[in-house]
Amino acid sequence: MTDTSTGAAQAATASLAPNTPRRFYRGGERVLDFRGVEATSDFDGYRPEDWIGSTARLFAEGGGGVTTLEGGVELPDAFAADAEGWFGTAHVSRFGGDPNLLTKLLDSGERLPVHSHPSREFAMSHLDCDHGKTEAWIVLVAEPGATVWVGFHDELAPEALAELVDAQDDRLLAALNPIPVSAGDAVLVPAGQPHAIGQGVLILELQEPTDFSVMLEHERFALELDHAFLGLDRSLALQSVDHGPLTPDRITTLRRRWADVEGSGSALPTEADAYFRAQVVRPVTGDVTVDAAYAAVVVVDGSGTLSTRHGTRRIAAGDVLLVPHCAGDVTVSGEVTLIRCMPPTP
């Protein structure tokens, strides 16, 4: 396809600046360290997320989050101006100009609250949105003993879940499956599964492009109930939560070691492909060329070059850039590891 888009071409050769909306929980230092950016004078320790290639806005907390490209163009406007340049014909035929993806860097400066995300079906029925929020965590940095929690280890009756949510005590976290994590791990979190991320983890997070969260644990973070329950009645919001059990065998299917990939390969279990794709590219034995695709590219280690039909650029750990479909096939060279965060295959 002929590239007629200056916006897409420019994005292919320009890194994205950090996009860190203020959130209700602490973190952000690891994001800045990873990106090689010094904290500004107004950094308050509540900037734990870097929203990459974002067309989504915060559900609460001021509504920020949309990515702005160089020149001040908001990303949804850039996509609308040249959807085929950004995404390719097949994607546009199925999804239109919707990227079907939000990518983040997330630094847990404290343990996040126990929460869950609605499914697509629940979001369409009750939130007037085609997207729920299945997500995946690609662990880049983890302090010793770092833990995440996913899914109830025992089945909870609706009244038992409501009781735990009303109590707002430690029993809610204790009801979840603890999962120790280290750098190189990946975990898929299907919509509906309650979960929490422990302190001391930097993750690359792929998710459906919404900020829908049901905050089962909310008092400790002083969240208003409309925020905690998405503006819905509590009993309705809790219907979006999977009551378990999430068994050890099922947890095994949700985990993967992305650090074991050489050449190129998926960072995530195959189940994730219906929602998003994360492709590790590591040219261990020579240059690696991968197919054209819209991708939020995060360089996680080393340095090298990235070449497209638009040219060749140096890349190094901490770089973040958007590569449009119209850039063509991508060749990666050098002692470098990057992850291409992409929409589902159309």
Image: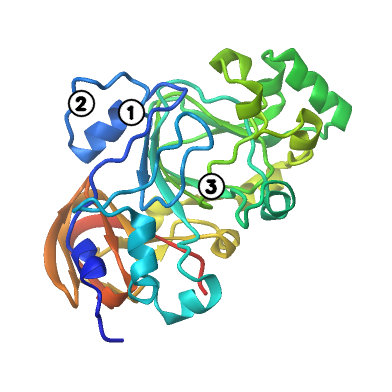
Is 37 above or below relative to 17? above
Residue 73, quarter of the rendered image: bottom left
Q: Amino acid at mark 2?
A: Ala
Q: Secondary structure at mark 2?
A: loop
Secondary structure under tag 3 reads: loop
Q: CA distance from mark 3 to mark 1?
A: 21 Å
Q: Is residue 138 visible?
A: yes
Instruction: Say whether disc 2 or disc 1 marks the residue closer to the N-terminus.
Output: 1
Res. 210 mark: 3
Mark 3 or mark 1: whose residue is earlier in sequence: 1
What percent of the width, then of the height, locates residue 5? Answer: 25, 74
Please tell me which residue lies in front, 153 or 324: 324
Query: Which residue lies under the disc numbered 2?
Result: 39
Residue that carries the numbered disc 1 in the rendered image: 28
Q: Nearer the viewer, residue 310 or 150?
A: 310
Circles 2 and 1 in contact, beta carbons < 8 Å: yes
Q: Give the distance between the C-alpha atoms of the residues marked 2 and 3, in whole angstroms.
A: 27 Å
Q: How is the image coloured?
A: rainbow
Residue in view at x 29 percent, y 76 percent = 326
Residue at left 74%, top 21%?
Answer: 165
78 relative position to 314: left or right = right
Q: Horizontal and vertical percent for residue 192? A: 69, 43
Q: Above or below — where is 131 with respect to 104?
A: below
Q: Position of residue 256 (x, y in %)?
A: 51, 51
Q: Select label 3 or label 1 by which is in front.
A: 3
Q: Quadrant of the N terminus?
A: bottom left
